[in-house]
Image: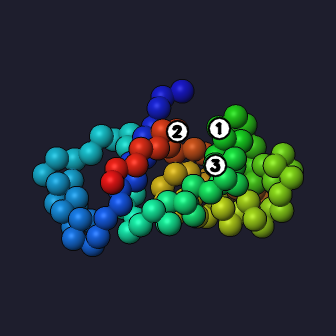
Amino acid sequence: MKVKEAEIRIGSIEDLKKAVGETIRQPPVSDRTIVFVRDAKTISKMLSEKRLELMRAIKEHPSYNVTMLANLLKRKQEAVSRDLSVLKRFGLVELEKTAKEVTPEIKSTKVMIEI
């Protein structure tokens, strides 16, 4: 499995604008997702114990859909779906939807935090 990186940066709106300008001048590595957050509290919510457990389960069982993951983790399907939505919003997972099910895929297997 190829390592895909997520880089989490903490900073102000001005820092974000500067980072966007740098990205325009030098495009990022294609296997890297950059997430910009305002504070460490956001990181702790994004990477909570339950969400990290969910990401590990997705990595270990890549063909599992949301229902199967919920059963594996002994969690409600709604809670798993909600966590997947958060992880998707931050670019850490992708969701493959079919008519009857949703199967998540890990987008980033390595997370770096830049302060």
SS under mark 3: helix
**Who's the residue at 81% across and 54% down the image?**
70
Residue assigned mark 2: 109
Upstream in sequence: badge 2 or badge 3: 3
Looking at the image, residue 39 sits to the left or right of residue 103; the answer is left
- Of residues 19 and 58, the one nearer the viewer is 19
SS under mark 2: loop
Do tag 1 and tag 2 residues touch (Cβ < 8 Å)? Answer: yes
In the image, what residue type sits under mark 3?
A: Leu
Name the residue at the top extreme: 1
Residue 58 occupies quadrant: top right
Upstream in sequence: badge 1 or badge 3: 3
**Who's the residue at 33% across and 54% down the image?**
115
In the image, what residue type sits under mark 1?
A: Lys
Q: Nearer the viewer, mark 2 or mark 3?
A: 3
**Who's the residue at 41% across and 44% down the image?**
112
Q: How many marks?
A: 3
Colour option used: rainbow
| Mark 1 residue crowding within 10 angstroms, few (<14) / some (14–19) / many (20+) | some
The residues bearing labels 1 and 3 have C-alpha atoms spaced at a distance of 11 Å
In the image, what residue type sits under mark 2?
A: Thr
Residue assigned mark 1: 59
Q: Residue 92 got which mark?
A: none
Residue 40 position in % (x across, y down): 45, 62
For residue 34, say whether it is visible.
Answer: no
Residue assigned mark 3: 52
SS under mark 1: helix
Residue 8 position in % (x across, y down): 40, 53
Q: Nearer the viewer, mark 1 or mark 3?
A: 3
